Amino acid sequence: MKHTSAIVLVGIVFCSCSTFLNRPTTNVNIHSSLDSVRICVNADTSQWYTTPAMITVKRAKEDLKLMIKDDTVLHQLNVKSKLSGAFISNIFYVPPIGFLVDLTTPKRYTYPKSLLINFEEGIPYVEKAPSTLLSPTKNLLCFKISIPEANWFYLNTGHGYGRRFGFLGIAGGAEYYFTNKYYLSAEYGILIDAIVPFPAAVDYDEDNHDSSNAVYGNVQVGSDYKRLHYGVGLQFNKTSYRESRTIELTPEYVDVLTSSMKQTNFGLALSSHFRFSNVFSVGINYYPSFITKQGNVFQTHYSHLLFIDLSFKIEAYRPKKKSQ
C-alpha cells in the first residue's frame, strides 16, 4: 500500500519557490567610489538618489538602467538581470513543477543586492560590491517561512515516553524589531516524521507501523550578532502519536488505527540561525517542555522537539533613509 508520508507539504511541491517567496520588487544597495553621486533608475528622472542608497526596483528580465550624474555629465550603465536563488532552488523539489509555474512570472529574476560604481579617468563602470548583510533597524518588519528538514521528537506514545526521528514540516511567522537591536517574533508550524527528506510516497512492507507529528507555536525575543540570529521565549506544542496495522481487504490494503496518543505541552523556545544572506539562513531549534495537559489534567513531565530548519525571510517593511 502506498502511503503519502508528506501530505502536509504537497502544496509546496505544486507552488514555485520564486512565485511564493519573492516579492514583485527587490532592493539594490548602490555605493560609489566618489562621494554623493546622483543616480536615477530606468530613466525615471523624477526620482534621484544620492549614493550610498538603497533603491527598490521591479523584477524583470530586462537589464536595470542606471543614469549617473557626475557634476553636469550624464552616464548610463546597464546592470544584468539574473535568475533568483528562489527560482533555482526548485531543483530540490521532486517533481520540479515549480519551474513551470515560475516561467510565467518576472518574479523569477533579480539583480545584485549590492553594486559599486567606480570612476576611472572620469568614466564610471559598475561592479558587484562585496556581499554584506543588512543591519536590522527599528520598526523593521519581516515575514518568514521555514522548512524543517530533520526533526527529533521525545513524546508520549501512550506506552511511556519515547524518541522518534523524521523529516519535513512547514512553518510561518513574523519578526518585528522594536529597537535597532532587539526583535519580537511569533511562529506557528507543523513537524512530521517522514522517512525521507523530500515529499514522496512511501511503501510500508511491515504489517505494523507508527507515525508522529507535532503542531507548535512560539513567541520569542531575540537579537543578532554578526551572522548569528538567535532568540528565546515560550512555546506550546501538540504532539500526536499513532500506531497502525496494514491489513489486506482484497483487492486493496488498508490501514487500521490500533492506538493513538495526543498531548499538549508547554515550555521554552530556544532558536539559533546562521545567516548565509539577507534572505536565507539555517538554524537549530530546541523546544523543551515541562508541563503537559491531557483533557483538563495538568502534570509535570519533560518532553522536547528538536529540529533543524531552512528559513527564508522576506522584508515586509524597512524604514528608508531620506534621500538628499
Image (cartoon, rainbow, N blue to C red):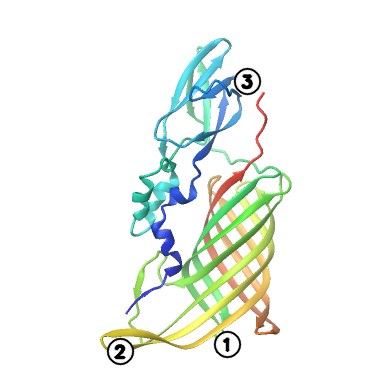
- Position of the N terminus, as image quadrant, is bottom left
Q: Type of residue at label 2? A: Leu
Horizontal side of residue 44 vs 181, given as left or right? left
Residue 253 rendering spot, x and y as whole percentages:
32, 84
For the point 49% across and 71% down, the residue is: 192
| Res 295 quadrant in image | bottom right
Q: Disc 2 on helix, strand or loop?
A: strand
Q: Is residue 193 visible?
A: yes
Instruction: Evaluate if marks 2 and 1 touch, with contact meaning CB atoms under 8 Å apart.
Output: no
Q: Is residue 123 visible?
A: no
Q: Type of residue at label 3? A: Ser
Residue 214 rendering spot, x and y as whole percentages:
55, 73
Above or below, comparing residue 292 to residue 89 in the picture: below
Residue identified by numbered label 1: 160
Q: Earlier in the sequence, mark 2 or mark 3?
A: 3
Labels 2, 1: front one: 2
Q: Type of residue at label 1? A: Gly
Q: Disc 3 on helix, strand or loop?
A: loop
For the point 43% across and 86% down, the residue is: 244
- 10 Å crowding of disc 2: few (<14), some (14-19), many (20+): few
Residue identified by numbered label 2: 249
The residue positioned farthest toward the left in the image shown: 251
